[in-house]
Amino acid sequence: MNYLAYRKSHINEMTVQMDFLGSIISDSKSILTLIIPDIHFSFLFIVKNNNSNKVVEVFDDLERKLGFDKFNEIFPSILTDRDPCFSDILGIEFSKENGVKRTYLFFCDAFKSNQKASVENLNKQIRKFFPKGKSIDHLTQDDIYMVNKILIESPLFSLDGHSPKEAFILLFGQESFDKLF
């Protein structure tokens, strides 16, 4: 299905944007970044030896924590680039638990990173904590969580002075937030 056609028929739905924050070649770890642009809510994951199976594992873990219905509510569609780590379309889109489609995965046009500008901007924000050219191999998921906490707890003008965390809880509930964090 074409992304624009999908958006036209799902106008009230939020699309999550996904990317990997680049790391130095010698690193075995990468940071998987996801954002719900409408509320500036980010999810950051440290992934060791990233590949398509590791990305699918992240989504399987999110579904296990949230349950199928809540996963589908929070991640109804995902927009990303053609990184080979995002190539297991069926693994990302379909639940291992019940075999049902849990999300729709869409890809930007080649060399059009501006089509997922929110996740690109998120990556720029993360660079303040993890500068380009510096190793991230020493980082743990807890380190990444602390950065994510700063990002989602900061009040934003675009959210009328509320934080992305507050917006997420308003939309998806405190229980969903607690399951994720």
Image (spheres, rainbow, N blue to C red):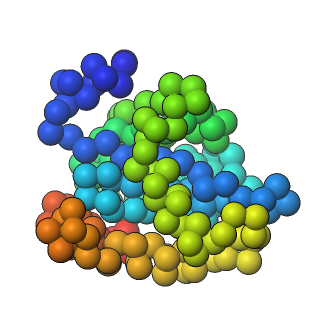
Left or right: 123, with 24 as reference point:
left
Q: Decide: is 93 above or below 122.
A: above
Q: Is residue 60 visible?
A: no
Query: Hey, which residue is sitting farthest right in the picture?
Result: 26
Q: Nearer the viewer, residue 181 or 120?
A: 120
On the picture, is 107 further left or further right than 157? right
Splitting the image into 4 quarters, where does residue 132 fall? bottom right
Query: Compared with residue 44, is residue 54 higher up or lower down, i.e. above or below?
Result: above
64 to the left or right of 80? left
- Residue 74 drawn at (x, y percent): 28, 52
Query: How far from the left and from the top, in percent, is residue 29?
Result: 71, 63
Quadrant in which the C terminus is drawn: bottom left
The part of the image, by quadrant, that contains residue 149 is: bottom left
Residue for point 60% across, 61% down: 31
Residue at 63% in and 77% down: 140
Above or below residue 115? Residue 32 is below
Q: Position of residue 118 (x, y in %)?
A: 40, 50
Reply above or below: 157 against 66: below
Which residue does the image show at 20% across and 24% down from the upper left?
8
Which residue is depicted at the point 35% across and 25% down?
3
Q: Quadrant of the N terminus?
A: top left
In the depicted view, which residue is nearer to us: 130 or 43? Answer: 130
Residue 61 x, y percent position in the rendering? 47, 58
Q: Is residue 8 visible?
A: yes
